[in-house]
Amino acid sequence: MADDSQLTEMKNNKSKNLHEFSTMQIIKLMNEQDKKVADVVALALPQIKLAIETMVQAIEKGGHVIYFGAGTSGRLGVLDASECPPTFGVSPDLIQGVIAGGDAALRNAIEDAEDNWENGKKDVLNHVTTKDVIVGIASSGNTPYVLGAVQQANEMGVPTIGISCNVDTKLSKNVNIPIELPVGAEIVTGSTRLKAGTAQKMVLNMLSTATMIRLGKVYKNLMINVQATNKKLRKRAINIIQELTGVDEISAKKANKEADGDVRIAILMLLFHIDPIKAKMMLSKHNGNFVKAIKENSLER
C-alpha cells in the first residue's frame, strides 16, 4: 500500500465508464457495492464491542460521549447524536456530535475546515472533560481536524475511539480503540459519502444503540424511554405500557398521565402497584437504568 489514503481515493474498475451507464446500471452497481459494507463491518465487531463497553463505563461514571468529524463523517456523527434524545429519552449532552466548521457545516460544505488541526484541539477543550470518551470519525483516517481532536483528548487522558475506512491510518495509530472499515474504492472516485459513509453510519448505529441498551434504556425490544412528542409516539408510549403490564388502554393512559408521560414510571407503577414517587425512587436508585430497577424489584417480590 502506497499510503494511508489509498483505499478511499483509489479508482473502482467497475465504474470506469460510469458516465455511459444507464440509470438501472448505475443503481445496480451501487447496490452491488453496498452489499459489501456489512461484511466489512462484521470484521470490526470485536473493536466495536470494546468501544461500546468503554462508552458504557464512561457514562455510568458521569461522563459523556462526543463524536468529532469533518464533512460527511462529521454530519453522520451529529445525526447519530441528535437522534438519541427522542429515541432513548436521554439528555442532549449525553452523546454529542461536533463537526469541523461548526453547525454551519451541517448544511454547507466548509471543506477546508477539516484541515485545521488546531481547531480540533480547541473543540475538544471546549466540549470534553476527563470523564468523557471521544470518537474521531474520518473516512481517510488522516483528517487533520480529527487528528488534532484525538491528540488533545490523549493529552487529557480521555479514552479515544477512531472510525476510519482505511487500514493502518494515523487515526488508528493514535486512538485507544481503532475501528477500521476498508470498504474499498467508491464508484465515484473519492466520494466517501457512499460506501464509506454507509459503513460509518452502520457503526455509529451500533455504538449508540448498544450503549443505550446496556444502560437500560430499552426493555425487551421496546423503547421504554421514548419521548412522546407527537401523535405517533404518544400512541407508541401507550402501546408499550399495555404490552408490558397487560392493562387496558384506559388504565395505561391514566398511569401515563400520573407519571407525567414517563413510560418507565407508568410501567413500574402498574407492575408493582406503587405511586409515582416510589417508582421514581426505584429508578433513581439505579441512575435511571430501568432494567436494573425492574430486575431488583422483581426479585424482591
Image (tube, grey):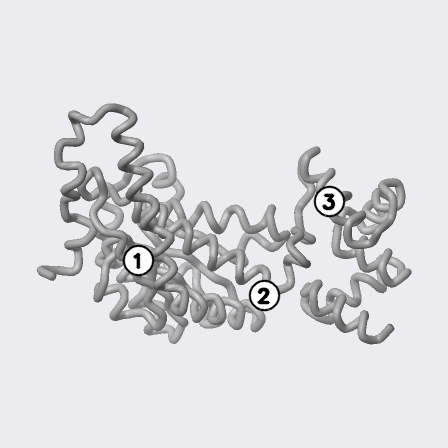
Check disc 3 and report its element: helix, strand or loop. helix
State the separation of the CA atoms marked 3 and 1. Answer: 37 Å
- Pointer 1 residue: 181
Task: Give x and y (percent) for residue 198.
Answer: 36, 46
Amino acid at pointer 3:
Ala
Q: Is residue 159 left or right of residue 70?
A: right
Residue 271 image-quadrant placement: bottom right
Q: Are marks 2 and 3 in contact (CB under 8 Å)?
A: no
For the point 82% across and 62% down, which residue is it? 279
Q: Is residue 121 left or right of residue 259?
A: left
Q: Are marks 3 and 1 in contact (CB under 8 Å)?
A: no
In the image, which is nearer the foreground, mark 1 or mark 2? 1
Q: Quadrant of the N terminus?
A: bottom left
Looking at the image, is 157 positioned above or below residue 249? below
Pointer 1 local density, CA inside 10 Å: few below 14, some 14–19, many at least 20:
many
Residue 44, numbered circle: none
Amino acid at pointer 2:
Arg
Pointer 3 local density, CA inside 10 Å: few below 14, some 14–19, many at least 20:
many
- Pointer 3 residue: 237
Looking at the image, is 294 positioned above or below residue 113? below
In the image, which is nearer the foreground, mark 3 or mark 1? 1
Residue 214, numbered circle: 2
Task: Give x and y (percent) for residue 32.
Answer: 30, 41
For the point 66% across and 46% down, which residue is it? 227
State the separation of the CA atoms marked 2 and 3. Answer: 21 Å
For the point 12% across and 60% down, which residue is it? 3
Name the foreground residue: 167 vs 75: 167
